[in-house]
Image (cartoon, grey):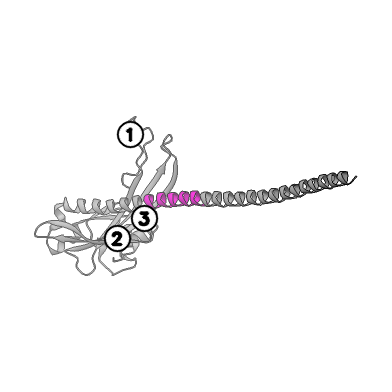
């Protein structure tokens, strides 16, 4: 009997050991769950970082694209300054004596006395603009999109409008040019459809050398864009200086 009791106690002891082992398996399962949760949290954090970086890159790309298109509009405005300089340099009356400034080309809203009066009565020094003999009606130069482009042509996306006036201090050898440039985003398959427009304005002071017969730009700067649709709009009536 004693031998049987000892065997039973040993068997019960072994069962107890097995029960304890089952308890240890539960501890390991709980540790595995915690580890899985930590991995999920880390992966979620990494995914959020990747998404944020992707959005940042997209934002920077859009901002860069807008900046480039604005710079194209400014380039168009500077092209307008160059256009006026070229017109003056190619005209003999530009270099006629001290009083010849009245015979130079001046781009105004229209080549009429009313346009000249609007320029004279605008903001700036009172000048005898009504004595100008060669006013030219300005417009959006080279700005009409092609309605039926040929296979190797594309719609014109850049244009400018200009106006110029004498320097109130030195009429003979100095003048000012204002130019508004536009960059048009045109639908490739529909040349008459304008998707977006960027606009910029610059003002420049030019020097006219009567001896060497040269016209040069002294300096220029950007300025706020003015309205330029009517004769009385600020672009045509004000006489700012850079």
Q: Is residue 228 left or right of residue 125?
A: right
Front residue of 198/211: it is 198
Which of the labelled discs sits on residue 203, or is there none? Answer: 2
**Among the 4 quarters of the image, the one containing residue 172:** bottom left
Q: Residue at x 11, y 56 (%)?
A: 213
Q: Residue at x 62, y 52 (%)?
A: 38
16 falls in the magenta region: no
Tell me where residue 103 appears, x and y as whole percent: 18, 57
Residue to which mark 1 is pinned: 153
Which of the labelled discs sits on residue 200, or is there none? Answer: 3
Q: CA distance from mark 3 to mark 2?
A: 11 Å
Q: Classify the position of the N terminus by image quarter.
A: top right
Front residue of 54/100: it is 54
Q: What range is drawn magenta here?
A: 52-70
- Look at the picture and state if 210 lies above or below 143: below
Q: Is residue 107 left or right of residue 170?
A: right
Q: Secondary structure at mark 2?
A: strand
Q: CA distance from mark 1 to mark 2?
A: 32 Å
Q: Is residue 37 left or right of residue 102?
A: right
């Amino acid at each position: 009997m004693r031998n049987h009791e000892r065997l039973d106690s040993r068997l019960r002891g072994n069962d107890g050991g097995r029960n304890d082992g089952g308890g240890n398996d539960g501890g390991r399962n709980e540790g595995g769950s915690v580890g899985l949760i930590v991995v999920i949290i880390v992966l979620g954090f990494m995914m959020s970082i990747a998404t944020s970086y992707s959005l940042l890159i997209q934002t920077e790309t859009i901002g860069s694209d807008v900046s480039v298109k604005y710079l194209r509009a400014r380039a168009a405005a500077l092209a307008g300054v160059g256009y006026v300089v070229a017109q003056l340099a190619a005209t003999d009356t530009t270099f006629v004596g001290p009083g010849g400034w009245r015979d130079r080309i001046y781009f105004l809203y229209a080549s009429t006395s009313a346009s000249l009066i609007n320029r004279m009565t605008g903001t700036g020094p009172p000048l005898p603009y009504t004595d100008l003999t060669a006013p030219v009606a300005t417009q959006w130069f080279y700005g009409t999109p092609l309605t039926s482009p040929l296979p190797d042509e594309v719609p014109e996306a850049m244009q400018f409008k200009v106006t110029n006036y004498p320097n109130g201090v030195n009429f003979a050898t100095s003048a000012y040019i204002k130019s508004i440039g536009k960059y048009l985003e045109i639908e490739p398959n529909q040349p008459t459809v304008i998707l977006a427009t960027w606009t910029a304005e610059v003002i420049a002071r030019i020097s006219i050398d009567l001896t060497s017969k040269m016209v040069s730009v002294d300096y220029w700067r950007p300025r706020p864009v003015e309205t330029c649709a009517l004769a009385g709009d600020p672009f045509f009536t004000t006489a700012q200086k850079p």
